[in-house]
Amino acid sequence: MRKKILLPTDFSENSWNAIVYAITMYKNVRCDFYILNVFFTTGYALESMMIPEPGEKVYEAEREKSESGLARILERLVDITDNPNHEFYLLSEFNSVLEAIKNTVAKKDIEMIVMGTKGDSDIANLIYGSNTVDIMERVTDCPVLAIPNSARFRSPKEIVFPTNYRTSFKRKELQHLIEIIKMSNAVLKLLYVAEDDELSEEQLQNKELLEQSLEGLPYSFHNLHHPDVKSGLNCFVESRGSDLVTFVNHKHGFFEGLFSKPLVKDLGYRSKVPVLTLHG
């Protein structure tokens, strides 16, 4: 069974870095990689009735630019990999980034999205671009692994999973995380950041359920006294040199408070450490 991975690209170096990260991470796994570029034409709104049609000059110019960029990526890949486990497919679509990715996930039965944290058009002082945050929050059919530009692949040895134990987790929600743990022999660090160590009865039950879901895997529980979850998580990750941070994005859950707009700018670790978003 081949794993199907989507690699969105806007031809920025950040998106190229994410592509290289993905093919290195899954070097021993039989994968179909779908490299997607989304194009649009300046001056047109996608929701407007006045959008260019295939065959029109402005549409064909943008489509050609998209397909040429994808061809250049394929040339770069040929120079760096000849892995027999990997097949590459090029996709070009006129749409919004979010809708194009949703369409591709559905049509190609995508199991994982690996993408950069920001593109060429995103504001320089934001660590995560608006497209990335939209996709992490709103594409719920498969996990999203966001790769910062400074991150180079190294097999993760420590994965940090912050949780407040206020929601329950099912093993099927964690299957992609479990796969990565097994693939890399990583240790999972379950982190509870709060001013008070005391857990409610419901939290204790959710913690026990989490233990059952992780049975047979290397993991440990950690409590960190800190008044602010974001800063506490940042301190934990940076002090330990952790390799990956993961969240389960339940609606109105823990993830929402960290990554909702306006973008949080004080999570320094996000410029260095990949983030895996799972969905409940």
Image (cartoon, rainbow, N blue to C red):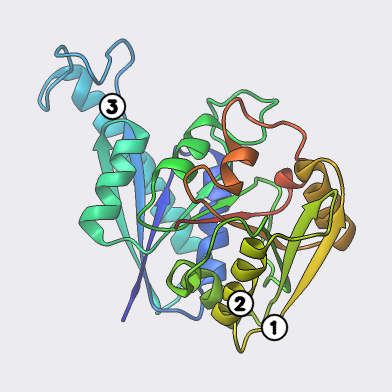
Disc 1: which residue: 218
Task: Identify which residue is drawn at 56% across, 41% down.
Answer: 256
Give residue 99's mark. none
* Place of residue 269 in the rendered image (x, y in percent of width and height, measured from the top left): 76, 47
Camera-near label (3 vs 1) is 1
Disc 2: which residue: 181
Can residue 106 be seen by looking at this rendering? yes
Q: CA distance from mark 2 to mark 1?
A: 8 Å
Q: Give the left or right position of residue 5, taking residue 95 as reference.
A: right
Work out whether 77 lies above or below 50. below
Camera-near label (2 vs 1) is 1
Disc 3: which residue: 62
Work out whether 141 lies above or below 148. below
Can residue 81 be seen by looking at this rendering? no
Where does the C terminus fall, quadrant-wise? bottom left
Task: Identify which residue is drawn at 59% across, 86% down.
Answer: 215
* Place of residue 236 in the rendered image (x, y in percent of width and height, measured from the top left): 84, 56
Within-10-Å neighbours for mark 3: few <14, some 14–19, many 20+:
some
Camera-near label (2 vs 3) is 2
Chain-order first, disc 2 or disc 1? 2
Work out whether 12 lies above or below 112. above
Check disc 3 and report its element: helix, strand or loop: helix
Of 186 and 6, nearer the camera is 186
Check disc 2 and report its element: helix, strand or loop: helix
Task: Identify which residue is drawn at 68% across, 77% down.
Answer: 186
